[in-house]
Amino acid sequence: MSIYVAELDTTANANSAAEISALLAAVEAASAKQGGEFIESQVTADHGRVFAVIEHNNILELRADLEAAGLKVDELALVRLVGAELEDVKKLKKAGQYLVEWDFPEGLTMEKYLARKKEKSPLYNDITDVKFLRTYVREDMVKCLCFYDGESEDAIVAARQVVDTPISRLHKLEG
C-alpha cells in the first residue's frame, strides 16, 4: 500500500472539538471503505485545516470515498515518510506541536532532497528546544510537511534556520 496525505479545508464545517472529531471519524471510515488505513491526523490550532495521513491502494478510490463522505479535499498526494518508521507512527496517531510546510523550489529532485536531509539532520542534535519528529515528502516534489515539538514558533523558525531550510507556512497544531 502507498501513503497519502489528504489536506482538508475545515473552515466551513469544523469549528468545535466535536465537529473535528466527527470529521476525523469520517476520514477514518472513508479510508477503510476499500481496505485503507487512517494513520494519523494533524489539526491546525485554528481548526482551519486537517492533514490526514492515509495508507491506501488507490488514490482515485480514496479521493472518491473521502468526497462521498462529504469531506472537502483540497489536496491529496502520494508521499514518502522520512525520519520515522510507519509502524511507529501508526502507534502514535497524534504527535507534534508544529507543522512546517516547505514549498520546494523548481528542479529539486527526491534524490537531492534526501541527500540534503541526510547532510542537515545531524544539526538538529545541537538544538535543545526543538525536536524534529518526521517529514512527509510529496512524491511529485511540490512540498513537504515537517512535524516538530518545540517551545514556541520562534524556536521552530530558529531550528529551521540552523538547518538552512525555508518555511513556506508554519502551523501551530491543536494540542
Image (cartoon, helix red, strand yellow):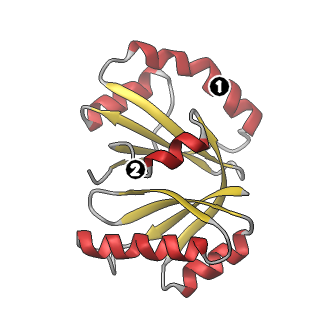
Which image quadrant is residue 75 in?
bottom right
Residue at x-position 42% and y-position 25%: 161
Please state if 153 lies on the left or on the right of 141 as rendered: left
What SS does tag 1 mark? helix
Residue at x-position 26% and y-position 61%: 46
| Residue 102 showing in the rendered view | no
Residue 29 badge: none
Residue at x-position 59% and y-position 48%: 143
Residue 94 badge: 2
Task: Indicate the amino acid at tag 1.
Answer: Arg
Residue 166 percent location from the top left of the image: 49, 35
Frontmost of labels 1 and 2 is 2
Residue beneath label 1, please? 116
Mark 2 Cα-neighbour bin, 10 Å: few <14, some 14–19, many ≥20: some
Mark 1 Cα-neighbour bin, 10 Å: few <14, some 14–19, many ≥20: few
For the residues bearing labels 1 and 2, Cβ distance under 8 angstroms: no
In the displayed structure, would residue 15 be above or below residue 41?
A: below
In the displayed structure, would residue 77 be above or below residue 111?
A: below
Please state if 31 lies on the left or on the right of 26 as rendered: right
Q: Looking at this view, is 108 or 22 the one in front?
A: 22
Task: Indicate the amino acid at tag 2.
Answer: Lys
Which image quadrant is residue 81 in?
top right
Residue 94 percent location from the top left of the image: 40, 50
What SS does tag 2 mark? loop
| Residue 164 showing in the rendered view | yes
Image quadrant for the N terminus? Answer: bottom right
Q: Looking at this view, is 145 or 86 the one in front?
A: 86
In the displayed structure, would residue 129 be above or below residue 28?
A: above
Residue 157 percent location from the top left of the image: 36, 32
Q: Label 1 to label 2, Cα distance in Å?
A: 27 Å
In the displayed structure, would residue 75 be above or below residue 157?
A: below
